[in-house]
Image: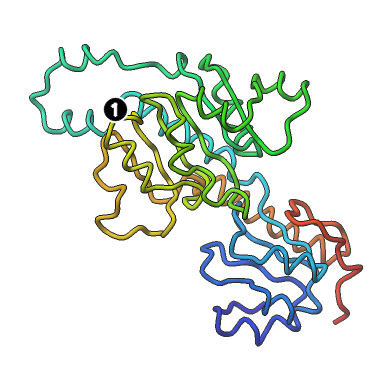
Amino acid sequence: MAKVGQEGLLDVVAEAAVIIGDWEHQVRINRAVIEQAARCLLIQQPSAGYENIDIEAASEAGIPVANAGPANSAAVAEHAIMLAIACLRHLPEALTEGEGGGWSQADWIDRDLPELGSRSVGILGLGSIGREVALRLRPFGCELLYSKRNRLEPADETALGVRYLDLESLLSQSEILVVCLPLTVETRGLLDRARLQRLPQGSVVINVARGDIMDYRALADLLRDGHLGGAGLDVYPVEPPPRGHELAGLPNTLLTPHYAGATQQAKRNILVNSIDNVNAVLRGEEPRFIVNEVRRKASAPSA
C-alpha cells in the first residue's frame, strides 16, 4: 500500500487494485488519475463527501466509487440539533454574559425565547444524515418538513414523521432549516440569496453539509439585517476560512471547525466500513455505499 500526494499519484495508480481517497479532500482523484488506473476495482473514499473524486470519469472508466456510507450520520445529526437549540436560546450571547457577569435577568426573560418543539424544521436532503435528524427531532414535537430529489414512499414518511414539500415551499415554511445535502453539480450554489430570503423572518439556518451549497455572503447580510435569527455552521467554502471572513462576528451565529462527524464512534465506523469494502472487492464481492452508476469490474487482478 502506497500513500502519496497529488504529484506522485499518477506514478502509482496504474498497478492499484484499490484507490483510497484523501479524507481531507486535498488530493484530487481527477480524470487524469482515473485514466491511468486501468486495474482499479474500487475507489474508496473514507468520508461521507466525495467531491475530491471525478465521479463522471470514474463511471466512464467502469470504476465504482464508494463513500463510508452512514458511518458518521448519527454524529452529524446530533451536532445539527445542538446548533439549532443553541441558536434558539441565543447561546453565543448568553455565554458572553454568563462569563462576564452583571447580566440583567429581566432582559433575558423579556426575550420570550422559543423552544425547539414549537418550531417547524425543514430538512433539506433526507439521506442518511437527514433521516437521523428527523428521528432525533420527533420526540421534541417539531413539525418536520423535508425536500429531496426523490420523494420517499408514504410508509417511510409516516415512519419518520415527515411531510414532503418542494424546495420553494420548504424554504417558505421552515423556521429552522437544516441542510444535509451532498455537494453535486446540482446542489452547488443551490441556496442563493433569493432562496435564503424565502425563509420566514427570524429563521435559523443550520449547515452540516458543504459550504458551497449556500451563498454565505448573502447569509451574512441576512443575519446582519435581522431577516434571519441565527445560524449554526460547521462547513465553509474554504476550509479553514481566512481570518476576518464574512461570517466572523455575526449576531447569534455559531461557527464550528467542521468536526460534526468526528466522534469516536463515527471515526471507528468510517474505518470499518472502508476496510470492509476494500476486502470485499479483493475477494470478488460487491462493495457497499456506491455513489456512481457502473458495473464493478469482474475480479481482482492476479498477483
Residue 33's quadrant in the figure?
bottom right
Q: Residue furthest front?
A: 194
Please report the residue visible at 74 percent of the width from the left and 30 percent of the height from the top: 152
In the image, taking residue 167 as reference, residue 208 lies left or right, namely left
Q: Quadrant of the C terminus?
A: bottom right
Residue 299's quadrant in the figure?
bottom right
Image location of residue 285, percent across then percent down = 87, 59
In the image, taking residue 253 as reference, residue 291 lies left or right, namely right
Q: How is the image coloured?
A: rainbow
Q: Which of 25 and 171 is in front in this view?
A: 171
In the image, taking residue 160 as reference, residue 213 lies left or right, namely left
In the image, taking residue 73 as reference, residue 115 lies left or right, namely left
Question: How many numbered discs, if any?
Answer: 1
Identify whether 135 is placed above or below 259.
Answer: above
Image location of residue 42, percent across then percent down = 76, 66
Identify whether 28 is placed above or below 223.
Answer: below
Please report the residue visible at 39 percent of the width from the left and 51 percent of the height from the top: 257
Residue 158's quadrant in the figure?
top right
Q: Quadrant of the N terminus?
A: bottom right
Identify whether 189 is placed above or below 93.
Answer: below
Graded by Cα atoms within 10 Å as few (under 14), some (14 to 19) or many (20 or more), the crowding at tag 1 reads many
Q: Which of 163 and 299 is in front in this view?
A: 163
Callout 1 amino acid: His
Residue under numbered circle 1 = 90
Give the secondary structure at mark 1.
loop
Identify whether 12 is placed above or below 134.
Answer: below
Image location of residue 24, percent across then percent down = 51, 63
